[in-house]
Image: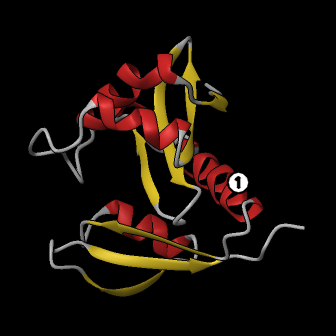
């Protein structure tokens, strides 16, 4: 089924968080990120997008328009391999580029499907962070 891609809003936060805690890799192991953290991420410092299927959020992404950080990109396990991650990635990178950002970055757990996803999309490993996560960067052209 083709999901509907649209910009996220405050009313989506509970569903976005439901997707976030359902993933099999890069799992939240504590309450470090709560629903309250999403509000500034989609309203002040960045923007978010969701994929909806039958009115339910099944995937989402959030990018920080100030720093170029990919704050989140998650797909519910029941909706993996539908191309939703790639669609979200592309719209987020395009938006960040339109903000004048040319170097984007993210961190992810090493040896995961997420790491392979980003490598396939052109992201380059930079270094291991003190948290144990791997940091990646990508250069993107500034949007016209």
- The percent coordinates of residue 67 (x first, y second) are 51, 66
> What residue did someone put label 1 on?
95
Circle 1: element type: helix
- The percent coordinates of residue 94 (x first, y second) are 72, 58
Looking at the image, which is closer to me, 83 or 75?
Answer: 75
Q: Is residue 142 left or right of residue 125?
A: right
The residue most toward the top is 55
Q: How many labels does the image show?
A: 1
Seen in the picture, residue 99 relative to 131 is either above or below; the reply is above
At a point 66% along the width and 32% down the height, the residue shown is 5
The residue most toward the right is 144
At a point 55% along the width and 47% down the height, the residue shown is 46
Q: Is residue 137 left or right of residue 17?
A: right
- The percent coordinates of residue 93 (x first, y second) are 64, 60
Q: In this view, does 47 lie to the left or right of 62?
A: right
| Rendering quarter of residue 53 | top right
Looking at the image, which is closer to me, 112 or 35?
Answer: 35
- The percent coordinates of residue 78 (x first, y second) are 37, 30
Label 1 Cα crowd, 10 Å radius (few <14 / some 14-19 / many 20+):
some
At a point 23% along the width and 41% down the height, the residue shown is 33
Seen in the picture, residue 59 relative to 70 is either above or below; the reply is above
| Rendering quarter of residue 68 | bottom right
The residue most toward the front is 44
Q: Quadrant of the C terminus?
A: bottom right
Looking at the image, which is closer to me, 7 or 10?
Answer: 10
| Rendering quarter of residue 96 | bottom right
Q: In which quarter of the image is the N terminus?
A: top right
At a point 57% along the width and 29% down the height, the residue shown is 8
């Amino acid at each position: 089924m083709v999901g509907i891609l649209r910009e996220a809003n405050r009313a989506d936060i509970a569903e976005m968080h439901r997707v976030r805690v359902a993933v099999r890799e890069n799992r939240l192991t504590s309450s470090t990120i709560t629903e309250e953290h999403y509000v500034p991420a989609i309203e002040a410092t960045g923007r978010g997008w969701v994929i909806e299927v039958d009115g339910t959020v099944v995937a989402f992404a959030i990018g920080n328009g100030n720093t170029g950080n990919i704050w989140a990109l998650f797909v519910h396990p029941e909706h993996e391999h539908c191309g939703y991650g790639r669609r979200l990635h592309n719209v987020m990178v395009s938006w960040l580029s339109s903000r004048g950002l040319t170097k984007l970055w993210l961190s992810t757990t090493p040896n995961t499907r997420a790491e392979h996803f980003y490598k396939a999309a052109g992201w380059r490993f930079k270094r291991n962070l003190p948290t144990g996560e791997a940091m990646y960067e990508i250069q993107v052209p500034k949007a016209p």
